[in-house]
Image (spheres, rainbow, N blue to C red):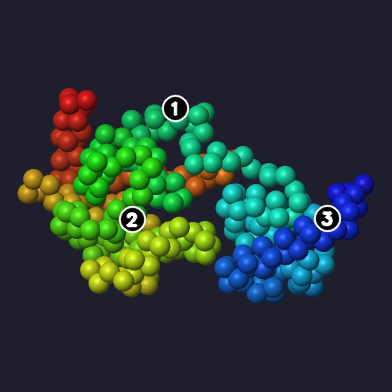
Amino acid sequence: MTSEVMDSPHHARHNGSMFGEELKRWRAIRRMSQEDLSGASEVSARHLSCLERGIARPSEKMVLRLSAALSLPLREQNGMLHAAGYAPRWQDGGDEIPPALKPVIDRLLEGCPDPAYILNAHYEVMHWNKAGLMVLELIKPGIRKGDDLAAAFFGDGPHRETISNYGEAAGFFLTRLRAEAADQGEDSPLWKTVRRAEADEAITIPPTGGAASLPVMPIEVVLGGQTLRLLTVLLTFGSPQDAMVEQLTIEQLLPADEETREALRRMSEGLALAG
């Protein structure tokens, strides 16, 4: 017998109602009509209506199909499964990097000659290499693991002068942060930083298309009278099976010209000697 048949009517109605509310909420966040979601998931609009009203309770397979059509992160898919009365499908390491992944991350960062650090979905700094820490210290002196990099970047500090193209770089960052907050939903803690940054007149929002569509953020840092021209590149883990790992991002700062490459090489050698 299926779980739908084995459940009591009250239990089925309860879970169906909870799931229906979550389904409707995420559909609104994604700005999809029932017809849009019907086409993306290949589920009839009539059945979607029944699910949202709590009249029908979805199977586990249906929950995952609709979650995929809504492009939900693994953690949110677990939430949808819970709302429907099912056990979570994906592991979730919470706010800590899974122990089995730490050696891999250490090797990735230590083997990277350029500044690099790891952020979670809320832009809290999880790990860094020596060159990455040097850059992070420019944004927030005394930075510690778990600190909010986005809040520090959009906050006041000497980095607004050290980063010579701060207004432009902050505009690129804000565009990215706004998109990620929308992807996480209306409860995302990123919205607080987004709203504060949107009111900052020093930030220049890039026009739609053109340079704004590039997957990198240009940043120019003045150190010792020399301008370092860097490109921020984001790397993620492919096909994660853990909800926490899915939300990890490696941010790497690549030299945009030969002068910057040479300067970073000298700095890396200096850090190696100091370390």
Which of the labelled discs sits on residue 151, or is there none? Answer: 2
Task: Examine the image and state in which quarter residue 37 appears.
Answer: bottom right
Measured in 3D between alpha carbons, the distance from the residue under mark 1 to the one under mark 2, in whole angstroms, is 28 Å
Give the amino acid type for the residue marked by disc 1 in the picture.
Pro
Disc 3 is placed on an element classified as helix
Residue 78 in view (yes/no):
yes
Give neighbour class at mark 3: few <14, some 14-19, many 20+ (Cα, 10 Å).
Answer: some
Left or right position of 41 against 163: right
* Residue holding disc 3: 11
Give neighbour class at mark 2: few <14, some 14-19, many 20+ (Cα, 10 Å).
Answer: some
Q: Residue most toward the left?
A: 225
Task: Please name whichever residue, 158 or 66, is drawn nearer the observer in this view of the structure.
Answer: 158
Q: Which sits earlier in the primary sequence, circle 1 or circle 2? A: 1
Residue 62: x percent and y percent?
A: 75, 56
Q: Residue at x 28, y 42 (%)?
A: 143
Disc 2 is placed on an element classified as helix
* Residue holding disc 1: 103
Give neighbour class at mark 1: few <14, some 14-19, many 20+ (Cα, 10 Å).
Answer: few
> Relative to 111, does residue 141 appear above or below in the rendering?
below
Q: Residue at x 60, y 49 (%)?
A: 74
Q: Which sits earlier in the primary sequence, circle 2 or circle 3? A: 3
> Relative to 85, does residue 117 appear above or below in the rendering?
above
Residue 229: x percent and y percent?
A: 20, 52
